[in-house]
Amino acid sequence: MIKNRKAFIVGLKSYKLSNKEKLFLKQHKPWGVILFSRNIKSIKQTKALTDNIKIIFKDSNYPILIDQEGGRVNRLGKIISFDNLTSEYFGDLFESDIKKLNIIYKLFIDKTSYLLKLIGVNLNTVPVLDLKIKGSSKIIGNRSFSKNKNTVSKMGDMCIKFFHENSIGTIIKHIPGHGLAKVDSHNFTPIVNKSLKYLIKNDFYPFKNKGSYFAMTGHIIYKKIDKLNPATHSKKIIQLIRKKIGFKNILISDDLSMKSLKGDIKTNTIKTFESGCNIALHCNANLNEMKIIANNSPLISNFIVKKTSEFYKILS
């Protein structure tokens, strides 16, 4: 059932599948689909959308993703407000009142998981394991748990554990670390000048020994490691993620339509797989771009099949 899918994820235009999107999903068989605020009007409507996707694939566990971090990254905004419940808020609570944190953070994740299951979503792109660093781009900001690498690491472990206990998968991001980026990678290519020794000790640290089945790469150039290629397109960085950070599960790219990647969609797709990423992510629901990605994505490997099957086990 899983084996005939291709190694990419796509977004959708609106609140329900168009005929062209249905045909695309049937023909090209992406590994997963990601939802955004543009796809979510109500619980009933979103559940109908995700049910229709799962019917196409004849798979009740078909991977349906969402960015539901809380705070300003709240795709469920038309259903519930989580505006004040930022990762920074929980990180501060971890450092000031661990008993209170354990209660409130679990309640937050239980509630989030309940809503995600109501709408048919099974994979959340959390936790953000980037450090909060003064002077860096505000694109991370209060999406980070803390400037303290130990706080970020331990909060990440809690986040993964609590979501898994609720039968929701997690995607750690933005591996190997977005905290030092001084520009927003949605619009520009961040360049980080720190040494490998510094990065391993600091920014890379929170990503080590994480029990998540998935990680999302960052489109960032680490100049002292690879002068030319952002992490998503860098064989050197992907090798570091595998060997130095020790992440052994599925690597998903960040969105290939982001302006931090300078090639066209075809080039960006090919380079994503050449670097060693397992799955390509495309979010903007542009059908022409989706077709290019589909035509340049391989069938999922035995490795992806195996790891996806492991992920499915937490859903039951």
Image (cartoon, grey):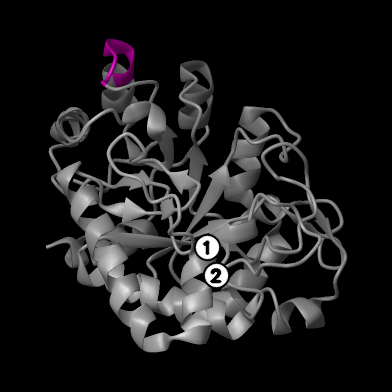
Dividing the picture into quadrants, the one containing residue 27 is top left
- Cβ–Cβ under 8 Å for marks 2 and 1: yes
Q: Residues within 10 Å of mark 1 (few under 14, many from 20)?
A: many
Q: Would residue 300 be counted in the magenta stretch?
A: no
- Residue closer to the observer: 51 or 252: 51
Residue at 35% of width from left, 21% of height from top? 14
Quick check: 37 left or right of 185?
Answer: left
What span is in magenta? 16-21
Quick check: 313 left or right of 230?
Answer: left
Q: Position of residue 59 (x, y in %)?
A: 15, 43
Residue at 30% of width from left, 27% of height from top? 25
> Could one spot residue 204 in this view of the protein?
yes
Q: Position of residue 126 (x, y in %)?
A: 43, 60
Q: Which mark is residue 128?
A: 1
- Residue closer to the observer: 130 or 295: 130
Q: Which mark is residue 145?
A: 2
Q: Which mark is residue 294?
A: none
**In the image, what residue type sits under mark 2?**
Phe
Whichever of labels 2 and 1 marks the residue nearer the N terminus, that label is: 1
Residue at 50% of width from left, 85% of height from top? 96
Q: Position of residue 76 (x, y in %)?
A: 33, 41
Per the model, the C-alpha gap separating discs 2 and 1 is 8 Å
Mark 2 or 1: the one toward you: 2
Dividing the picture into quadrants, the one containing residue 11 is top left
Quick check: 133 left or right of 84?
Answer: right
Rendered position, 313 above or below 154: above
Q: Secondary structure at mark 1?
A: loop
> Could one spot residue 209 in this view of the protein?
no
- Toward the top, the furthest residue is 19
**In the image, what residue type sits under mark 1?**
Val
